[in-house]
Amino acid sequence: MAGRIRQADVEEVKARTNIADIVGERVALKSAGVGSLKGLCPFHDERSPSFHVRPQVGYYHCFGCGESGDVYSFLRAMDHLSFTEAVERLAARIGYTLHYEDGGAAPETSGRSRLYAANAAAAEFYRGRLADPDAEAARRFLGERGFDAGAAAHFGVGYAPKGWSALTDHLLAQRFTREELTQAGLVSTGQRGVYDRFRGRVVWPIRDVTGQVIGFGARKLYDDDPGPKYLNTPETPIYRKAQVLYGLDLAKRDMTRGDVRRVVVVEGYTDVMACHLAGVTTAVATCGTAFGAEHMKIVRRIIGDEQSAEVVFTFDPDAAGQKAAVRAFAETRTLNAQSFVAVAPDGLDPCDLRLQRGDAAVANLMRTKVPMFEFVIDQRIKGLDLGTVEGRLAGLAAAAPLLADIRDEPLRRRYEHVLARRLGEDLAEVHREVERVRRRSAAAPAASGADRPAPRGREEPAPPAESELRVTIASLPRTADAALERDALMAFLQYGHRIDAAVLAEAVATPFGHPALEAVRAAVAAVDDRARPGWSVEAVQTVREPFRSLGAELLTAEFPARDELHAVASAEDLARRLLIRRLEREKTELLGAIQRVPPESEEGRGLRIRLRDLDRERQKLLAAE
């Protein structure tokens, strides 16, 4: 059995991989200064970006939750991979052949990698069978909906044969096991063993944001099929329907292009296809579940959380569509990006709209969209007799809580105007009711807390939370020495490879005053070769706890410089300032020592010689500035 991956290969794959490309597939990144990018953290929910990536050093760090690491740790955390699987995935991505310690070729992978491989093989099988004679019903289904062979190929659409074991036999011949096929959700288990889950159906591969196939959606074609109209892959270790958006792998690039970042949420696979073919290339769909909080987190990370971004939902105008809109609104209330609803004429979904009225009609949906808030208000007051006082009061009571939940005051006041117009009520009355609901909501938590009886006796103090133990850049003392040490470490970790090695070694040789900064300095000083790629990442990973997170912050924080050339110059200046500080401190100690010894003694003469040398060294450093 082959051993572990050769360490040289691990380092080479990481050196050849741009961490910004990997992170950027899941997080919308924008410039955050020289050599730094930032976006919304994928590890915790946040409104302001605190997640920083430094491609030059191959490292990321979140200033909010403290998560940090290199490209391998990012993949492991996001996709739940083992270290070996993370290396193998990146190696395959760049076409690099890995070597193992016993000299063998790459061993067969296991676990999640095998599930990805099984799904990829199944997708290829289904895609190939779409051209078979017995797939006529599938080709007719697609053709009737306006999708030719090119469209099917673009989205990877395939056909699952009617037999019970066509896919199973094919994958078993490729040395997948029945257990792996079961874990991947490709087969079901009956009294006689496993059998193909999808049979006699059109099949859409469902891919994650990186383009890997993680599951399938399938529509039945034949009347004798007793199953549901649509059948999806069940929950598996790599497929969680609440965390998947169909078409995201194709849409993510265009979501962040242009002046407006936009995602369009539709209801089905064919709707996604129709939108993309009509030029609305940012369309995605949920997979057998309503749009929820996890979907919103994915969208927010891709398009950001800025008011210039847009999330557009397409809903049927029927009762089910109205309920879906209200549920979606609940998820978008805390989003800075604007949310809209686009309802097609006659209630057509995008696929039927394209068939009946052409591509232009689908594209025109984006021009006829209405703010989701107005759409939801209309649903809340729909059916009320606004010509009566009672009807207007009922409408105000139904809609006021929606406004009260809007945290942005200017936006809330603007929608108060909208509601007042809808109801035909005085604006002041609407404002008073909204404020009353807001005050009641704000007082509820305080009241519930006040009702609790006070604890009796003396309680043991709670242990400090991890966040209280963590030292951050913001929590460092506001002193000149701490600022110099902080800025110097930031410069050395980010640009140390560009500084003279001897100068850098001397600059980090003297202990620092602050314990946390000293822990980081010691890790930097312990590195032998600071010119090789990845040295700063390794240094941060060796910082003793609880100060490692501070090291990660210093490595990824925005360094104040106009460009990289000025950053290197600043780093060199900070190194000189540390050396000057050390010389000045030594000079102070020497002046004190001279006062304690006879001036004509041998010790006194030696101290004065050393003092003279210190002055020369200091003048030389000052002249270099």
Image (tube, rainbow, N blue to C red):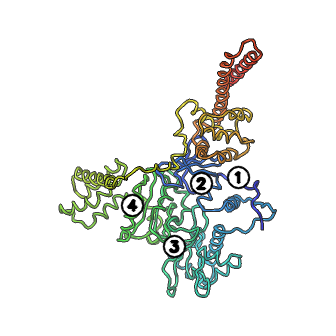
Quote the CA–CA distance across marks 2 and 3: 36 Å
First reached walking from the N terminus: tag 2 or tag 3: 2
- Which amino acid does the dot numbered 2 rest on? Val
Mark 3 neighbour class, 10 Å CA radius: few under 14, some 14 to 19, many 20 or more: some
Give the residue pinned by disc 3: 146
SS class, disc 1: helix
Spatial CA distance of label 1 from label 2 is: 15 Å
Residue on which the image places disc 1: 16
Q: Residues within 10 Å of mark 2 (few under 14, many from 20)?
A: some
Dot 2 and dot 3 residues touching (CB under 8 Å): no
- Residue 404 lies, in percent from the top left, at 32, 54
Q: Amino acid at mark 4?
A: Ala
Q: Position of residue 86 (x, y in %)?
A: 66, 60
Q: Which residue is mark 2?
A: 23
Mark 4 or mark 3: whose residue is earlier in sequence? 3
Residue that appears at 62% across and 58% down: 75
Discs 4, 1 touching: Cβ within 8 Å: no
4 or 1: tag closer to the N-terminus: 1
Disc number lying in front (4 or 1): 4
In front of the other: 586 or 407: 586
Q: The residue under label 3 is which amino acid type?
A: Gly
> What is the quadrant of the N terminus in the image?
bottom right
| Crowd rating for badge 1 (residues with CA inside 10 Å; few <14, some 14–19, many 20+) | few
Q: Real-space Cα distance between discs 3 and 1?
A: 43 Å
